[in-house]
Image (tube, rainbow, N blue to C red):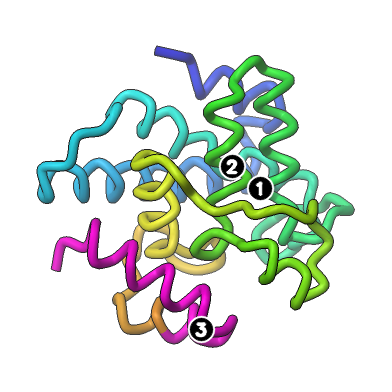
Amino acid sequence: MIDFRKIILKYYDADSSLFHTLWLHSEAVARKALECLEIRGIEADRRFVLEAAMLHDIGIFQCDAPSIHCQGSEPYIRHGVVGAEILRLEGLPRHALVCERHTGSGLSLQDIETGHLPLPHRDMLPESTEEQVICYADKFFSKSRRLDEEKPVEKIMLQMKAHGPGPAERFRMLHSRFGTV
């Protein structure tokens, strides 16, 4: 098992509000992802799910999002690709894929081009079971309000619909596979 806390602390001050936000959010996502797998009886690499869920947002410190204590210069939409770069440098290419594929319900090339998003022009959709369950679980927790408060599925669906039919349909498919209610 990798020491994900040690990796995070290479980039975050353990006494900072940003570390606290990242850690609590990541713990909630990891718990939810593992719960979904357990309840549904889905085979997956649970150790990897724990590690990757704890690291999925490692790139937020380089982003400009003051409301969640991020003082970087990158647009927040890039936190996944920034995190992926970090984890590739750490020798964790599989974990890096989770970083870049968890945003929204995954991002298609069409989403990126149509939205003129400042991201690489390629599909960034979760492929493996592990990527998909982390992407799904992440939607239930905000970093800008109570960190352990789980959003209702209906609210998430409305948020996904605001980004168009593709993201909403992808979330619906993830929910049909991993939903526990």
1 and 2 marks in contact (CB < 8 Å) = yes
Which SS class for mark 1?
helix
**Label 2 sits on residue:** 99
Residue type at mark 2 is Cys
- Closer to the camera: disc 3 or disc 2? 3
Answer few, some or many: residues within 10 Å of disc 3's Cα (few below 14, many 20 plus, some between 14 and 19).
few
Coordinates of residue 65 in the picture (x, y in percent): 74, 62
Q: Nearer the viewer, residue 41 or 54?
A: 41
Q: Is residue 167 magenta?
A: yes
* Relative to 33, residue 177 above or below: below
Which span of residues is magenta-colored?
Answer: 158-181
Which residue lies under the disc numbered 1?
80
Q: CA distance from mark 1 to mark 2?
A: 5 Å
Which mark, residue 165?
Answer: 3
- The residue at the point 74 percent across, 32 percent down is 85
> In x, y percent, where is residue 177?
24, 59
Q: Which residue type carries mark 3?
A: Pro
Labels 3 and 2: the sequence-earlier one: 2
Magenta portion: prevailing SS class: helix
